[in-house]
């Protein structure tokens, strides 16, 4: 066990969370959510995606959302860019970090970004080069790192392959993503170990969807390996439109509650975070999908 003393959380709620909503969420609400997250102490927020509006209509307002944020010093704002077109559109909105997103299975790569794994690496290469030339940090995501909705179980060797390819083109950080939340702790550790063959511990993060209720356990399993960076989603929002039935990422509130209970620092104010989750949940007319938020909101009401 080498538990970290500090954890960095990237809240992906505005992007991963809201990309999956059926009804359009106005830019104003997305911006309001980003503001509340940064006020709660989040140091990185994944704001939006510069993807095809035909594929993901919810992210069609990417430029408007980025332009509307009153940036807070010390906070990093990241965006997804699957190709040069997306990157060029993103540059004008001055992201601190971009994310290229590949997959550990061929079928998911095709469904999500309409190309093979090899073609995706070819598309990412110029994006990575252009970003780095501008001093923009490049993160990579490996989707379906433990299981694929189309191919079933995914072996750690597949994760290792994509991690190696991403490393070769200059991707600086790799996120191991359980897109459909089927992973369990030991499988997630194996996927992490595969990524760690090509990336240092400081350059690897976990991105766990909670479809089967395993994401907090998976987070703990990765923490025990010393992994100290996680993508989480406020109010447990989200899912991927190309992975039907998958639910949101582990709720930021639940992860923060667990970490603080383990005396691990996050720099996040849990009460303000709960307010952020309530703000967006109220707009969506549902309760936050977070046990910790529910418990604390009930306590407040009592
Ligand atoms: P494509 O159709 O293969 O692209 O899509 P294309 O280059 O052949 O272009 C076709 C049309 O799309 C053209 O327009 C392009 O201009 C346009 P037309 O001439 O027909 O009018 N186009 C674009 N428009 C805006 N922005 C762009 C862009 N690129 C092309 N960047 C593409 C390829 C990747 C664009 C498409 O498949 C796409 O947008 N996919 C969406 C992928 C996505 O957003 N998925 C969800 C996010 S990933 C995720 O959730 C997983 C993650 O959370 C980790 C995990 O949990 O696993 C990160
Ligand atoms: Mg995701």
Image (cartoon, rainbow, N blue to C red):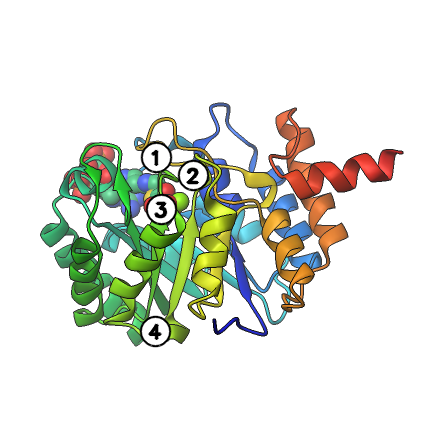
**Could you tell me which residue is drawn at 28 percent across and 47 percent down?**
146
Ligand 1 within 8 Å, label 3 CB: yes
| Residue beneath disc 3 | 178
Q: Secondary structure at mark 1?
A: loop
Q: Are marks 2 and 1 in contact (CB under 8 Å)?
A: yes
Q: Is residue 166 left or right of residue 72?
A: left
Q: Secondary structure at mark 3?
A: strand
* Picture coordinates of residue 22, whole percent (x, y): 47, 24
| Residue beneath disc 4 | 134
| Residue beneath disc 2 | 59
3D distance between C-alphas at marks 4 and 2: 24 Å
Q: Are marks 3 and 2 in contact (CB under 8 Å)?
A: no
Q: In the figure, 17 relative to 269: above or below?
A: above
| Residue beneath disc 1 | 53
Select label 1 or label 3 by which is in front. Answer: 3
Ligand 1 within 8 Å, label 1 CB: yes
Quadrant containing the C terminus in the rendered view:
top right
Q: In the figure, 274 relative to 259: above or below?
A: above
**Could you tell me which residue is drawn at 60 percent across and 34 percent down?**
289
Q: Quadrant of residue 78?
A: bottom left
Q: Are marks 4 and 2 in contact (CB under 8 Å)?
A: no
Q: Quadrant of residue 129?
A: bottom left
Circle 2 crowding by C-alpha within 10 Å: few under 14, some 14–19, many from 20: many
Q: Earlier in the sequence, mark 4 or mark 3?
A: 4
Q: Earlier in the sequence, mark 1 or mark 3?
A: 1
Q: Secondary structure at mark 4?
A: loop
């Amino acid at each position: 066990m080498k538990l970290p003393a500090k954890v960095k959380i990237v809240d992906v709620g505005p992007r991963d969370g809201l990309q999956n909503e059926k009804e359009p969420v106005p830019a104003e609400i997305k911006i309001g959510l980003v503001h509340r997250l940064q006020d709660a102490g989040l140091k990185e927020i994944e704001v939006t995606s510069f993807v095809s509006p035909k594929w993901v209509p919810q992210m069609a307002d990417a430029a408007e959302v980025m332009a509307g944020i009153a940036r807070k010093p010390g906070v990093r704002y990241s965006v997804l860019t699957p190709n040069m077109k997306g990157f060029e559109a993103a540059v004008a909105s001055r992201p601190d970090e971009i994310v290229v997103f590949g997959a550990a299975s061929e079928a998911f790569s095709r469904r999500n970004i309409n190309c093979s794994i090899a073609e995706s690496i070819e598309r990412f290469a110029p994006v990575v080069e252009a970003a780095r030339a501008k001093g923009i940090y490049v993160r990579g995501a490996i989707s379906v790192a433990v299981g694929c909705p189309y191919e079933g179980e995914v072996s750690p060797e597949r994760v290792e392959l994509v991690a190696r390819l991403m490393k070769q083109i200059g991707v600086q950080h790799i996120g191991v993503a359980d897109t459909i939340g089927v992973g369990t702790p030991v499988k997630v550790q194996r996927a992490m170990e595969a990524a760690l063959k090509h990336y240092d511990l400081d350059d690897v993060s976990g991105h766990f969807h909670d479809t089967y209720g395993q994401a907090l356990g998976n987070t703990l399993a990765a923490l025990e390996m010393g992994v100290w960076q996680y993508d989480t989603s406020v109010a447990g929002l989200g899912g991927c439109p190309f992975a039907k039935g998958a639910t949101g990422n582990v709720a930021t509130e639940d992860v923060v509650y667990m970490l603080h209970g383990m005396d691990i620092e996050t720099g996040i104010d849990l009460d303000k975070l709960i307010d952020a989750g309530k703000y967006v949940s109220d707009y969506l007319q549902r309760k936050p999908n977070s046990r910790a938020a529910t418990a604390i909101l009930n306590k407040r009401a009592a």
